[in-house]
């Protein structure tokens, strides 16, 4: 797969390292030099935000939520039918909670900005150290993700598996509300305990239906 990573900070670099290590092509994009530096350190390439999204099969948004509206405007015309993974945790300005309104999520808002894209919430409940080293804890870790789209579900499950995660579908895109709350919970816990930012969530006894990801033929159009 060819994966565009928009944003080349902690998350972009961590995911880029694992995704490249899994044998995929990675193209980074950002506003400044960070994309080129990340490409050099991982063996990927870099380009403009729009060009990266246009070339890719999967586009990962590893940017602050505050930048998502601008990035969506830049890529909207080239991501129709493509998988777009939203990794953001939309923290409020003072970090005391989420900036989103109750009853919605960053991922659902991004889906409204990108009509036609197959939007997925994933990777937000784990930290960059785990993105960059899925085997960090010496056991297979869960990649919890939410999407309405069956083709996206299968593709993201393949991506997660190739990186070493167990893909766990937690429900439709509206479940991003809970994934974002879990992301915040993990952040708040690290801050309250001066933690090492390594913690992640794994679901014990996951239902079989959360672990099967093959899209029906009728969804492949
Ligand atoms: N850090 C974590 O462990 C973690 C874990 C889960 C989720 N998240 C979420 O993942 C996202 C990224 O976090 P991070 O820690 O990687 O942040 P970061 O280190 O600050 O990196 C953000 C990146 O986004 C780029 N960027 C900002 N505005 C942009 C724009 N308009 N167009 C293109 N690129 C833009 C920045 O590059 P330039 O300034 O050079 O453009 C930078 O490379 C955030 O939403 C965060 O909530 C973080």
Image (spheres, rainbow, N blue to C red):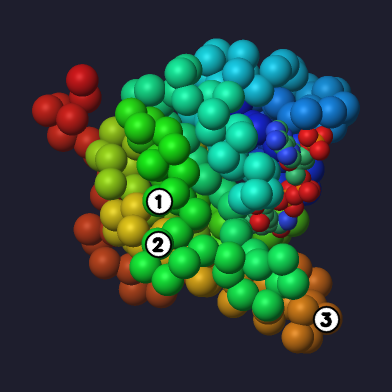
Image vertical order of residue 127 relative to residue 132, above or below:
below
Image vertical order of residue 75 relative to residue 108, above or below:
above
Question: Which residue ends up furthest to the left in the rendered image?
Answer: 218
Residue 198 as seen in the image, left or right of residue 24? right
Q: Residue at point 53% right, 24% down?
A: 75
Answer with the quarter of the image where residue 171 lies. bottom left
Q: Position of residue 183 (x, y in %)?
A: 57, 67
Question: Which numbered tag is attached to residue 108?
Answer: 1
User: Foreground: 41 or 28?
Assistant: 28
Answer with the quarter of the image where residue 19 lies. top right
Q: Secondary structure at mark 3?
A: loop
User: Foreground: 42 or 137?
Assistant: 42
Q: Residue at point 58% right, 65% down?
A: 99
Q: Residue at point 46% right, 18% down?
A: 77
Q: Position of residue 162 (x, y in %)?
A: 51, 38
User: Foreground: 214 or 182?
Assistant: 182
Camera-nearest label, 3 or 2: 2
Q: Position of residue 117 (x, y in %)?
A: 38, 31
């Amino acid at each position: 797969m060819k994966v565009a990573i928009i944003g080349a900070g902690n998350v972009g670099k961590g995911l880029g390292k694992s995704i490249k290590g899994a044998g995929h092509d990675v193209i980074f994009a950002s506003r400044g030099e960070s994309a080129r530096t990340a490409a050099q350190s991982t063996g990927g390439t870099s380009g403009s935000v729009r060009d990266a999204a246009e070339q890719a099969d999967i586009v990962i948004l590893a940017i602050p939520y505050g930048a998502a509206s601008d990035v969506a405007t830049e890529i909207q015309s080239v991501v129709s039918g493509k998988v777009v993974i939203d990794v953001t945790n939309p923290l409020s300005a003072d970090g005391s909670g989420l900036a989103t309104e109750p009853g919605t999520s960053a991922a659902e808002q991004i889906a409204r900005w990108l009509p036609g894209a197959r939007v997925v919430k994933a990777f937000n409940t784990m930290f960059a150290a785990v993105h960059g080293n899925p085997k960090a804890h010496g056991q297979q870790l869960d990649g919890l993700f939410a999407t309405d789209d069956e083709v996206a579900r299968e593709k993201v499950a393949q991506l997660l598996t190739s990186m070493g995660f167990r893909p766990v579908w937690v429900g439709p895109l509206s479940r991003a509300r809970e994934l974002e709350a879990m992301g915040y919970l993990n952040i708040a816990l690290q801050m309250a305990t001066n933690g090492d930012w390594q913690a992640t969530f794994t679901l014990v006894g996951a239902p079989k239906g959360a672990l099967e990801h093959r899209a029906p033929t009728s969804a492949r159009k």
